[in-house]
Amino acid sequence: MPKIPRPENSQPAKALWFDRSKYAYINFIVEDSKDVQVDIQENKMIFSCKSADDTNVYNEIYFYDKVEPKDSRERRYDRTINVMLRKLKDKVAWPRLTKDTGKPCWLAVDFDNWRDWEKEEEDGMAEYERYVDMLQDMKKGGAQPAMDDLDDLDRFVSYLVFCNTLNMAFRCQRDCYMQEFDTVVVSCCPAELKLENNGKKEKIKGFNVTLQDTILFPEGGGQPDDRGLIGEVPVLRVTREGAEAVHFVESALEVGSAVPLRVDWERRFDHMQQHSGQHLITAIADSKFGYKTTSWELGRQRSVIELDTPSVKPGEMEELEAVVNEKIRAHIPVTVQLLSADDPTVEKVRSRGLPDDHAGPIRIVDIKGIDANMCCGTHVSNLSHLQMIKILGTEKGKKNKTNLIFLAGRRVLKFVERSFSTERALTSLLKTGPEEHVEAVDKLQKSVKLLQKNNLNLLRDMAVLIAQNFKNNPNRGKVFSLHRKDGDNEFMNIIANEIGTEDTVAFLTVGEEKGAGLFLLAGPVETVDTLGPRVVDLLEGKGAGKKGRYQGKAGRLARRGEVEALLQQHTRLHSSEEE
């Protein structure tokens, strides 16, 4: 019996690993983990925990070589559980973490930490020196270095690892304007994705795919992820996990196969315009008015910047809009730098901090002479590509903040198109010019309110007359039933009150004759308590009642006849019992 048994319905945690002369390190990526258990043995380890949503997590790893369990340690953090494995043989490099040559889909190399091997002892580094030479050849644009001394899988994995070490950023971050790209499938694992469909979230079965490199941006920095195609397979979601971009698709892809990658350019360029526009607005709002940005959201139709101020002064947003558009017309370049974490330049740039699982270099987006900001997102290469920015206004935000609402680039043009179409439609409907639309709508609203009030009075009068007509009928029965398309709960209750329900059962409905609507069942308390739930079932609706009234929503008023038959049958049975 294993020390840590595998729980039912478990899944492996994503993990990053890197090698050192004396230790191998594994970082299991599980946010807000609980019930963490780690069993380190000489040739394998078992990791188990629960995630924040109570998902069972379980990893079993057979090591490439032996370790010292007593000198190995683990430590839990908010986003990761880090394991330090003491190698049995010092200064012997591990080319992979696992004994098996196959690469698990949940395991990736922490490229940034792996690179630090260069600073370690000289002994046993001949292999590393050889790969450094390979990287220099790659930088010169030469042919791919020969790796004939490695087996096929090791050659493939080594090539991918060291290409990524060279780049340290996704292709979409190095060239935001690239729309097509040929790459290689590194892994393909079964997975599930929750997608919203008509306001409801549903699970879709598919595959998580990692690629040698990607032009599809994974969500981050306030920017949504890209969409696109791997071959002809649509990519439904792209997320970042450590140093990797994970692409969710519904069809499996062959590991090791070369595939063409295409980005949904309209979506991407829109995100580039909004994101660069946010950087520009944030920088000018800070330098001109001292308003710091605390967060931002790139929405589907408009974007919002949260400013750290309870309010803005009149005229400031108009001035801000004028300045940012002046900068756009000035054709100012936007550049990207990749810096190491210990570069002193990093301390001088604007930032809200790095994610805990950040891997790779630090990326600085620089708007020349205006702003330098730490950011992972895709951006335009020149402010002129923003076209223009429109600040729609501000509104009160949370925690004494102010929300600035803006549009950039094509969204401004689409907003003008929609506004003009709306204006033209209103002109046709209201029979007035655009400058009179507000006044005309105000008059219409007042007229509608007056008509509604008059209609309500008529309905009340009608309800009273209907009830009196029933009461004055000498041949009336003990069941009163009525349906009207127009009406509301008040209309039905007035009729029930006027009729009196001590001896009469009233069944009233309003709404579409064969569709949905409202219902009211009123009568003797015992009768209503008995029949109310059955009436709800027949009408396929929802309702509740007390003190001789049972009312609610009906799903199918077409079944009114069945309810009437039920009431008549109950009344006859009750009458015969009394006799």
Image (cartoon, rainbow, N blue to C red):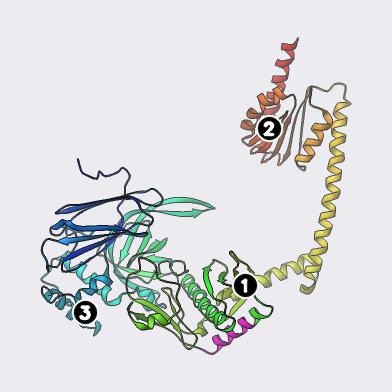
For the residue labelled by badge 1, is the local secondary structure a helix, a strand or a loop? Answer: helix
Badge 1 local density, few (<14 within 10 Å), some, or many (20+)?
A: some
Q: Amino acid at mark 1?
A: Phe
Position in image of residue 379 (x %, y %)? 45, 78
Going from N to C along the chain, the mark reached first, 3 or 1, is: 3
Tags 2 and 1 touching, CB below 8 Å: no
Kindly report which numbered mark, 2 or 1, lies closer to the viewer in this rendering.
Answer: 2
The image shows residue 461, relative to residue 534, as above or below, that is below
Can you identify the residue that label 2 sits on? 545
How far apart in space, not on screen, are marks 3 and 2 (Cα)?
77 Å
Q: Amino acid at mark 2?
A: Gly
For the residue labelled by badge 2, is the local secondary structure a helix, a strand or a loop? Answer: strand
Position in image of residue 306 (x %, y %)? 56, 70
Badge 2 local density, few (<14 within 10 Å), some, or many (20+)?
A: some
> Where is the C terminus found, in terms of image quarters?
top right
**Furthest residue to the front?**
70
Going from N to C along the chain, the mark reached first, 2 or 1, is: 1
**Furthest residue to the right?**
472
**Furthest residue to the bottom?**
330
Kindly report which numbered mark, 3 or 2, lies closer to the viewer in this rendering.
Answer: 2
Badge 3 local density, few (<14 within 10 Å), some, or many (20+)?
A: some
How far apart in space, not on screen, are marks 3 and 1 (Cα)?
49 Å
How far apart in space, not on screen, are marks 2 and 1 (Cα)?
49 Å
On the rendered structure, is 334 left or right of 286? left
Going from N to C along the chain, the mark reached first, 3 or 2, is: 3
Give the residues drawn in magenta, as a range.
Answer: 319-331
Can you identify the residue that label 3 sits on? 135
Residue found at x 21% / y 44%: 3
Quadrant of the rendered image containing residue 208: bottom left
- As drawn, the label of residue 66 is none
Can you identify the residue that label 1 sits on? 415
Q: Is residue 424 magenta?
A: no
